[in-house]
């Protein structure tokens, strides 16, 4: 089965097609540091499908990162996934976006994952061999703590200088969710629960007006390969 994976919980736009039988990404697009998720998500998916000679009707399921993440960016991916899933009759599995990063660090007995929450804060969670054992939560970088000393830390480079002293020398990288990791942490055999965004705090501003139907809430029958 092919699954379409989407994540807009970070500054990166992540989408891909994953073969659930092998766990491998058939195709993926990761646009670094865009923050213009509403503008680029649907065209990016369309281009990826077209290059693979596939359409949305070839998908058997969808997986979407549910955060934690900033309000505006996060909802673009979730609303798009929910709309497409409903229109196509596909199950939509929501996952914690941090889990998709923690999964990539599963070779480490203990790992700490942090992403930029803006407002001089980070979203974080702790993992033991890829399984979440603490979090998610939101704190200032200087307040990052975990019950166990991590053997690896994933954090954006611009936040490293704000780390507490006890994390300063921990081996680190800066990872983001990948399509294959999003699918790997989803329970594809279960009936999906209703999508629930992990905001962890109030929106950065007053809730904006509804996102226009195009492109965040596409009319599915107008998509390439879906007829209409």
Image (spheres, grey):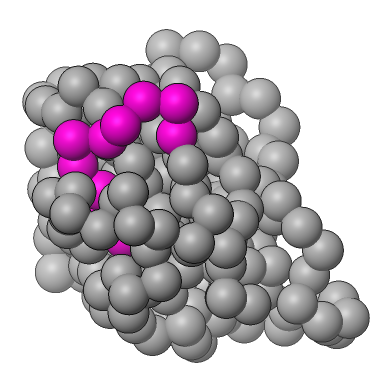
Q: Quadrant of residue 32?
A: bottom left
Q: Is residue 47 visible?
A: yes
Residue pictured at 20% horizontal, 22% vertical:
109
**Residue 116 located within the stretch drawn in magenta:** no
- Secondary structure mostly seen in magenta is loop
Which of these two is toward me, 11 or 31? Answer: 11
Q: Residue furthest front?
A: 165
**Residue 154 located within the stretch drawn in magenta:** yes
Q: From the top left corner, tell me how far across and down residue 127 is, in percent.
A: 35, 28
Range of the magenta residues?
146-155
Q: From the top left corner, tell me how far across and down residue 40 is, in percent.
A: 42, 83
Horizontal arrangement in the rendering, residue 155 relative to residue 9 (left or right):
left
Which of these two is toward me, 175 or 55? Answer: 175
Q: Quadrant of residue 140?
A: bottom right
Depicted 71 relative to depicted 6: above or below: below
Horizontal arrangement in the rendering, residue 16 relative to residue 93 (left or right):
left
Q: Is residue 176 visible?
A: no
Residue pictured at 56% horizontal, 39% vertical:
136
Residue pictured at 51% horizontal, 28% vertical:
134
């Amino acid at each position: 089965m092919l699954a379409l994976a989407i994540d807009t919980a970070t500054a990166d736009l992540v989408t891909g097609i994953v073969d659930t039988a092998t766990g491998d990404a058939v195709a993926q697009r990761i646009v670094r540091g865009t923050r213009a998720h509403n503008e680029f998500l649907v065209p990016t998916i369309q281009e990826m499908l077209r290059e693979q000679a596939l359409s949305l009707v070839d998908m058997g399921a969808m997986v979407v990162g549910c955060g934690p993440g900033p309000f505006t960016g996060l909802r673009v991916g979730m609303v798009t996934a929910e709309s497409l899933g409903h229109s196509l009759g596909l199950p939509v599995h929501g996952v914690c976006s941090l889990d998709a990063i923690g999964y990539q660090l599963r070779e480490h007995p203990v790992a700490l994952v942090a992403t930029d929450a803006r407002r001089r804060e980070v979203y974080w969670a702790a993992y033991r061999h890829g399984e979440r054992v603490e979090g998610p939560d939101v704190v200032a970088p200087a307040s990052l703590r975990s019950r166990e000393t991590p053997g690896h830390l994933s954090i954006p480079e611009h936040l490293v200088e704000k780390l507490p002293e006890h994390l300063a020398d921990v081996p680190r990288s800066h990872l983001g969710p990948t399509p294959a990791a999003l699918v790997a942490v989803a329970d594809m055999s279960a009936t999906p629960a209703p999508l629930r965004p992990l905001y962890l705090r109030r929106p950065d501003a007053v809730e904006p007006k509804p996102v226009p139907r195009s492109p965040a809430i596409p009319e599915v029958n107008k998509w390439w390969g879906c007829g209409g």
